[in-house]
């Protein structure tokens, strides 16, 4: 794949992924704020606890299935049926377990709502295999535009349904209704686009090959998300459902910043690497582009959140959510490691290093979760930091593995991240000083607005003065003009 084609693919994918993420997150966040004013944190906590196991299939399994199909590269009917049957053989038993386990978990956690929510989320798993196969059919041709339309529409449809229920006497069902409506909208949307219907005609070799690819990819995805889920479970055990709700609110705010700027980059790995596989120079180009771009957009965003977390939560949430700010600050600190640690597993998968990625992900999860369990704390924000701390060291190790595979100099790689890191650090220091010295009498909204404007000016001003070429390369690549 020529360099100009890579740049064009990056541009198209990033543009549509960004439009999708910004719209979906903006709309989703507005919906969340409306629901947060109608529902207490305990309901959000009950939903989070109910969905922990279901999301193992609904999220991890669905996209692992899509990646396995893309990695195998066979789109004949027998191969697609093999993928559908492989996913169904896992989704159906998990759905049955959730149906039976709901009342039991509700009693153990002393949260009765779990007994109602968990079976509903379990039943939704039965459509996941179909969605996974249709996802792969769409993404075979880099259908980022179709995905964007799907996600934006489902966010609105599900959100409207949830809000309508929240304003009714059945308000406790608002969040489940939101999820159910959104899922079935996506199912109809993708069927109308692909016209694919599952069948039983398949062959043994296709099933075996799909399983060989699916299981490692699925486990890797689940393991990489297990730290957040383990945190939710530990919060439910150590604290109460209200604290879990505060954690989810903090995470929701962080996601509203993270997803528009990071999710577009995550979505590039498999489709683009599948186009350049075997060309070491092109693979290295894709890798370097994505990592440096992630540093360019993520570091200033989360450095800023660390400084303004208090004003951000005061401006957005009611008084009952006042405990969100310190948790949000801790989540933002962990997000500073995005360019170093977050992309390692998916980059390994995209390069065909499934076994290494599985070993790496398992080691990270075991160490981080082990640290969380072994180090007791009554502080939810400290629990977040404890969970993420070991990932820093593993992140550096994973970087070295990937850099060796792609024949990239480690020194050159980290120097390529330095402009964003230094500029973001100076930006945060300046914002913190100005806020403490001059903005004490302003309202939270005023301080927040001034801080954002100041941060943008300082960050891009520093890059323009000291790293103009580096910044220009990032911008050019994002608009498809990079080489």
Image (cartoon, helix red, strand yellow):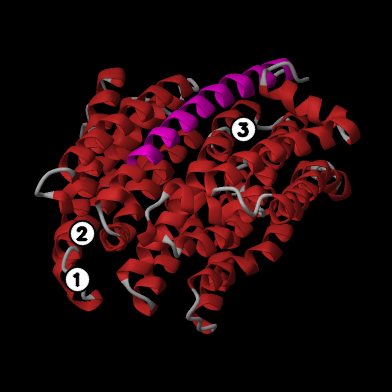
Number of the front mark, 3 or 2:
2
Which quadrant of the figure has residue 194? top left
Cβ atoms at labels 3 and 1 below 8 Å apart: no
- SS class, disc 2: helix
Disc assigned to residue 118: 2
Q: Residue 273 carries which label?
A: 3
> How much space separates mark 2 and mark 1, taking CA atoms?
9 Å
Magenta residue check for 5: yes
Disc 3 and disc 1: Cα gap in Å?
Answer: 44 Å
Tag on residue 106? 1
Q: Is residue 440 visible?
A: yes
Q: Where is residue 336 in the image (x, y as percent from the top left)?
A: 66, 53
Examine the structure image and report whether residue 414 is included in the region drawn in magenta: no
Q: In which quarter of the image is residue 274?
A: top right
Residue 200, placed above or below residue 389:
above
- The answer to whether marks 2 and 1 mark residues whose Cβ atoms lie closer than 8 Å is yes
Instruction: Pick whichever of labels 2 and 1 is earlier in the sequence.
Output: 1
Which quarter of the image is occupied by the C terminus?
A: top right
Label 3, label 2: how many angstroms apart (C-alpha)? 37 Å
Residue at position x 57%, y 59% from top?
329
Q: Of label 3 and label 1, which has the lower sequence position? A: 1
Going 36% across and 44% down the picture, which residue do you hit? 33
Direction from residue 246 to residue 483 in the image, left or right: right
Q: Position of residue 442 (x, y in %)?
A: 60, 48
Q: Nearer the observer, disc 3 or disc 1?
A: 1
Secondary structure under the numbered disc 3 in the rendered image: helix
**Relative horizontal placement of residue 405, taking residue 68 as reference (left or right):** right
Magenta highlight range: 3-31
Q: Can residue 216 be seen in this view?
A: no
Question: Mostly what secondary structure, the magenta segment?
Answer: helix
Instruction: Give how far across and how far down residue 207 sits, in percent.
Output: 35, 43
């Amino acid at each position: 794949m020529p360099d100009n084609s890579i740049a064009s693919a990056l541009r198209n994918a990033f543009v549509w992924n960004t439009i999708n993420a910004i719209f979906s997150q903006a709309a989703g966040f507005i919906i969340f704020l409306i629901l947060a004013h109608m529902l207490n944190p305990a309901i959000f906590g009950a939903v989070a606890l109910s969905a922990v196991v279901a999301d193992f299939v609904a999220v991890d399994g669905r996209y692992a299935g899509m990646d396995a199909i893309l990695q195998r590269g066979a789109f004949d009917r027998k191969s697609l049926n093999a993928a559908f049957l492989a996913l169904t053989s896992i989704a159906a038993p998990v759905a049955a377990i959730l149906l039976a386990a709901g009342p039991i978990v509700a009693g153990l956690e002393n949260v009765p709502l779990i007994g109602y929510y968990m079976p509903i989320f379990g039943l939704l798993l039965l459509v996941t295999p179909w969605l996974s196969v249709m996802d792969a059919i769409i993404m075979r041709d880099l259908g980022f535009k179709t995905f964007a339309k799907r996600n934006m529409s489902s966010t609105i449809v599900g959100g409207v349904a949830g809000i309508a229920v929240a304003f009714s006497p059945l308000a406790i069902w608002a969040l489940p209704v939101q999820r159910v409506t959104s899922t079935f909208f996506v199912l109809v949307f993708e069927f109308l686009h692909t016209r694919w219907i599952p069948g039983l005609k398949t062959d043994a070799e296709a099933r075996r090959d799909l399983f060989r690819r699916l299981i490692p990819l699925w486990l890797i995805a689940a393991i990489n998300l297990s730290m957040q889920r383990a945190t939710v479970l530990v919060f439910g055990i150590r604290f109460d459902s209200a604290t879990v709700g505060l954690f989810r609110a903090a995470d929701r705010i962080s996601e509203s910043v993270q997803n528009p700027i990071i999710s577009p980059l995550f979505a590039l790995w498999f489709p683009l690497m599948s186009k350049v596989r075997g060309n070491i120079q092109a693979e290295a180009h894709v890798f370097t582009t994505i990592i440096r771009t992630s540093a360019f957009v993520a570091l200033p965003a989360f450095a800023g959140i660390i400084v303004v977390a208090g004003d951000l939560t005061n401006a957005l949430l009611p008084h009952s959510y006042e405990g969100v700010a310190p948790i949000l600050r801790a989540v933002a600190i962990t997000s500073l490691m995005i360019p170093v640690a977050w992309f390692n597993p998916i980059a390994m998968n995209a390069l065909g290093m499934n076994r290494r990625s599985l070993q790496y992900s398992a080691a990270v999860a075991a160490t981080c979760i082990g640290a969380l369990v072994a180090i007791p704390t009554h502080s939810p924000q400290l629990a977040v930091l404890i969970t993420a701390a070991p990932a820093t060291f593993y992140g550096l190790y994973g970087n070295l593995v990937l850099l060796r595979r792609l024949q990239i100099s480690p020194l050159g790689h980290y120097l390529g991240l330095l402009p964003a890191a230094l500029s973001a650090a100076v930006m945060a220091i300046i914002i913190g000083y100005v806020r403490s010295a001059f903005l004490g009498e302003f309202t939270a909204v005023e301080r927040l607005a001034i801080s954002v404007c100041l941060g943008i000016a300082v960050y891009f001003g520093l890059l323009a003065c000291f790293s103009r070429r580096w910044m220009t390369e990032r911008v050019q690549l994002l608009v498809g003009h990079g080489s």
